[in-house]
Amino acid sequence: MNPEQYLQFKSERTQPAIDLVSRINIAQPQSIIDIGCGPGNSTQILVNRWPNSEVVGLDNSTTMIEKARQEYPKQKWIVDNAENIDSNIKYDLIFSNATLQWIPHHEILLPKLFNCVNSGGAIAVQIPKFKNMPINVAIETVANYSNWINYTKGCEKLFTFKDLDFYYGILNKLATRVELWESSYFHILNSQESLIDFIRTTGLKPYLDRLPFDEMRSEFEHEVLTECKKYYKIQSDGKVLFPFNRLFFIGYK
C-alpha cells in the first residue's frame, strides 16, 4: 500500500480517529495498541491524548510501517496481522480506526481482541460503512461488467461489513458497558476525479490488485468514475460533496 497516496487525504482519514479517541472514558491507560495503524497518523491522536502511555502501532503493511518508523522513530511499530495478536500480552486500550473491515470473522476476532484488554480497559473501533455507499455500488456495478468479472469476481467478499446490532450482540456478552454510534462525514473534494483518489488505496484497492496491467487499472478506474458521476454531482463552486458513513463502538472491561 502506498502511504503517500493514503495520506493525500490525511485530515479526512484522521478526523474519525480524533472523534473516537475523544469518546474513550479511560483516565490514564498505561499500554495502548493501535491495530491497523497505517503510516501512524491515527496513532498520534492516542499519543497526544495520553503522552505518558506506551503506544504500539501494528499493521500488516511493511510500507506503512516503514513510513511510520520514518515519521515517528521513538515509537514501537510492529508488522503483523491483527489475528496474530499475542493473547499473553494485555493492553489497557485496544484501538482500531478503519481496519477491521479488512479482516473476516469478527465474531471470532472481537472476543480474541477483548481477551487482550486489561480489567478497567476498553476496545474502541471505527469501521467505514462502505458497503451501502453509492461509491461502492459504482465499484461493484463496474466489477460485474463482462470485461472485468473474470478478474474481480469475489472481491466484495474481501470486506467485512456488519451493522450495529451485530457488534452489540458480541459486545454485550463481553463488556461491562457498551457505546455505539454512527456518523456521516461530508468530505469536500476538489473534483469528481478526487473520488477515485480517495478510495484508490482503500475500497478500490482489492479490485485494482486483481488487474495485471496498469492500462487495465486505469480503464477500470475510468469506468468507476463514470458510474460515480451519476451519484456525486459538481457543486456551484466546482467542488464535490462526498458523504462518508462510519460506525463506532467502545466496549469497556
Image: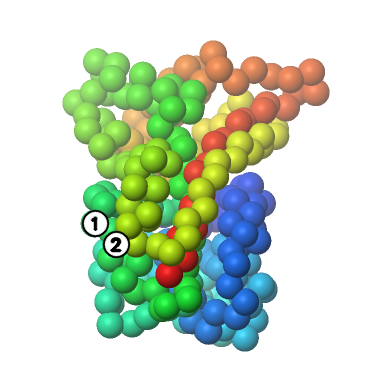
Q: In the image, which disc is placed on residue 134?
A: none
**Mark 1: secondary structure:** helix
To which quarter of the image does residue 235 belong?
top right
Residue labelled with disc 1? 108
Task: Quadrant for residue 64, please give it.
Answer: bottom left
Q: Is residue 55 visible?
A: yes
User: Around disc 1, counting alpha carbons within 10 Å, would you say few (fewer than 14), some (14 to 19), or many (20 or more)?
Assistant: few
Q: Quadrant of residue 158?
A: top left
123 or 171, nearer to the observer: 171
User: In the rendered image, which residue does mark 2 sit on?
Assistant: 111
| Proximity of marks 1 and 2: CB atoms separated by less than 8 Å | yes
- Which residue extends farthest left? 150
Residue 156: image location, x then y, percent: 29, 34
At 23% from the left edge and 23% from the top edge, which residue is drawn? 149
Residue 140: where, in percent of width, then height? 35, 24
**Can you say which quadrant of the picture contains the N terminus?**
bottom left
**As drawn, 98 above or below 148:** below
Query: Which one is in front, 180 or 101?
Result: 180
Q: Residue at x 62, y 59 (%)?
A: 23
Spatial CA distance of label 1 from label 2 is: 6 Å
User: Residue type at mark 2?
Assistant: Pro
Q: Is residue 166 above or below residue 53?
A: above
Up-down relation of residue 240 to residue 251 (above or below): above
Q: Amino acid at mark 1?
A: Ile
Position in image of residue 177 (x %, y %)? 47, 60
Q: Number of callouts in the render?
A: 2
Q: Does residue 147 appear to the left or right of 117 in the view shown?
A: left
